[in-house]
Image (cartoon, rainbow, N blue to C red):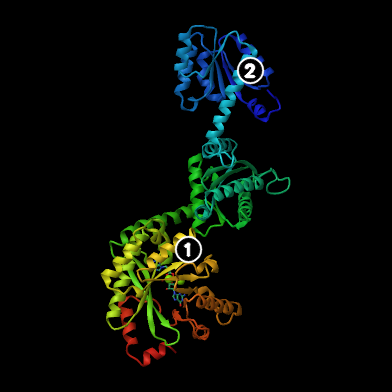
Amino acid sequence: MDPDDPHFSQLKTSTIMLVDDEPVMLEIVQALLEEEGYRHFVAVEDSTQAVAKLVDANPDMLLLDLDMPQVDGFQVLQRVRELDDFAHLPIIILTASENPDNKLKALELGATDFLSKPVDPSELALRVRNTLSAKAYQDHLAYYDNLTGLPNRLLFIDQLDKGIFQAKRDDRSLVLLDIGLDHFRNINESLGVHCGDQILQTVASRLTRVLRGSDLVGRGDTSVQIESTARTGGDEFSVVLHGAKSVENASIVSRRVLEAIKQPFSLEGNDVHLTASIGIAVAPDDGDDADTLFKHAVSAKDFAKKQGKDRYQFYSSEMEAHSRALMQMASDLRAALEKNQFELYYQPQVDAVSGRVIGMESLIRWFHPENGLVSPMEFIPVAEEMGLIVPIGEWVLHQACHRASEWNAAGHKDLKVSVNVSANQFKDPGFKASIVSALLSSSLAPRNLILEITESMLMGDIDQLADLLREIKSLGVSFSLDDFGTGYSSLSYLKKFPIGELKIDRSFLLEVPANNDDNSIVRAIIAMAHSLGQVVVAEGVEEIEQLEFLRQHDCDIIQGYYYSKPLNQPEFSEYLAAQLEPPQECQSAAK
Ligand code: C2E
Ligand code: MG
Ligand code: MG
């Protein structure tokens, strides 16, 4: 055996426990093993103490004599195997007996191997080494992540528990960072698991690099130490900091981690960009056992994600209160449909040239019995997360189609209704059927239904998505791309999707026409959409100057407070009726 082999030198740090009632045997075995380079021993002469000492010392293997007074080797073996933590501890039986029944009995009780007394030195060395190698390999499989080589969750929780125990004993703090990669699922879905794996490996090495060294925060500042870094979930890593200034410096460490992850990942010639969200919990204040601390770090991370990602968040009781309020909202939302607390509002869409109302966007409102009006910006994300958006969206679709059909029947020819659709609805296998059902039951002509989707929904498998869109479009309905310019869509793949209309996001119009950069962007969007054969809608138009600019640059449809805020059904009916009575109202609207 090569004593310089790093694997073997690692084995030498193992703790070997010896239990034998003959002190001279203990001395001989220990001396032989010391000659081989082993350094940590727990020698027990009194077998009645064996199990208690074992639990205390947590050795890597046990060399056990069989023939002992009071409590013999069989009894020790049996008791050790009854302990969950030691069910797989390697145990080598040392025995002078040649009796095969004894060996059989020891095997049945869970002995790993046998050595005959008197002990042959080279046999001893070989057995111990082989047994420890096998255990080290098993430990590695059980406690380390295969992909990154970092400790896994099992080992991490164990280390965290010990760290918290020591921190409490020494009256100091321990900081846990829970690091989650943002949108990692998208990467796996769009680029494949192989690329996802490569990213995880790079993240692991970046974390190790960033967190290396005791002078992590300031040169020579040894007040923050990294106790361990682990992969604790699919796209989740955890780090423990300790030391006098660990709490003060947790933000600095977090910022470094965020920065390191933000560097582009180079995959097969392409740059992939990623961010992370970090939750921070401090022991003992935020939890004095590993499970509680971990849970709180995770909820801080979830909070950071909800706040917009790419940030860190300390666990706090206010954060908990906010999360509780969200949970309350989620449970209230469940009942809201049954209790008829939703109402659909409509905002007119006006032809930029003629000033005629050509359609309306349906916008949902929730009238909460205690909290009053809740904005869709607040409750739609919660409904999405809770899986409630599918039934809510179905209700919206039916309502919108029925009202539009009624208004069309009342003489407002070819009014189109735009309905906002969420990603989860889109992914739902029953989506197409619910569109068909809404159209059939309302008798709305399919050409008068427009489904508003957002750029973020167009990520992932582009070909598959384009097929799905085409399939739905074959019903005769059309698609509008909402909030255009706020997402990531590259112009080159926009043309792959059958999108008939593009809505310029309100944020681009805020400073139009005063801001020349914004003017250029808006003009460019209109030109691009027209070259792709798309209709352009401007949303959030409030001022006459905006309207004039948009008209001048050939924007097709205008929506915004300039014409009207979203109105409830009777108000919108009135608004429409006024349109049928020219001339004054119509002219004033088209000012
Ligand atoms: P959106 O689809 O982009 O709708 C436009 C939002 O801008 C609406 O907010 C509308 O009231 C507001 N708006 C329109 N004109 C103006 C204006 O001139 N000035 C200003 N300041 N705001 C204007 P709202 O109704 O609060 O809806 C917010 C978002 O909630 C919508 O953005 C949409 O993403 C979502 N949403 C609304 N209804 C539904 C729905 O039925 N289903 C789904 N999935 N999402 C919905
Ligand atoms: Mg919309
Ligand atoms: Mg919009």
Element type at marker 2? Answer: helix
Tell me which amino acid carries mark 1: Leu
Instruction: Decide: is 248 above or below 510.
Output: above
- Tell which of 178 and 8 is nearer to you: 8
| Residue located 59% across and 40% down the image | 150
Look at the picture and state if 138 lies above or below 332: above
Residue 574: image location, x then y, percent: 31, 82
Q: Position of residue 444 (x, y in %)?
A: 30, 74
* Nearest to the observer: residue 85 or residue 93: 93
Front label number (2 vs 1): 1
- Numbered badge on residue 125: 2
> Picture coordinates of residue 282 (x, y %)?
55, 46
Q: Position of residue 465 (x, y in %)?
A: 45, 61
Q: Amino acid at mark 2?
A: Ala
Image quadrant of ligand 1 equals bottom left
> Which element carries disc 1, helix, strand or loop?
helix
Report which residue position mark 1 lands on: 458
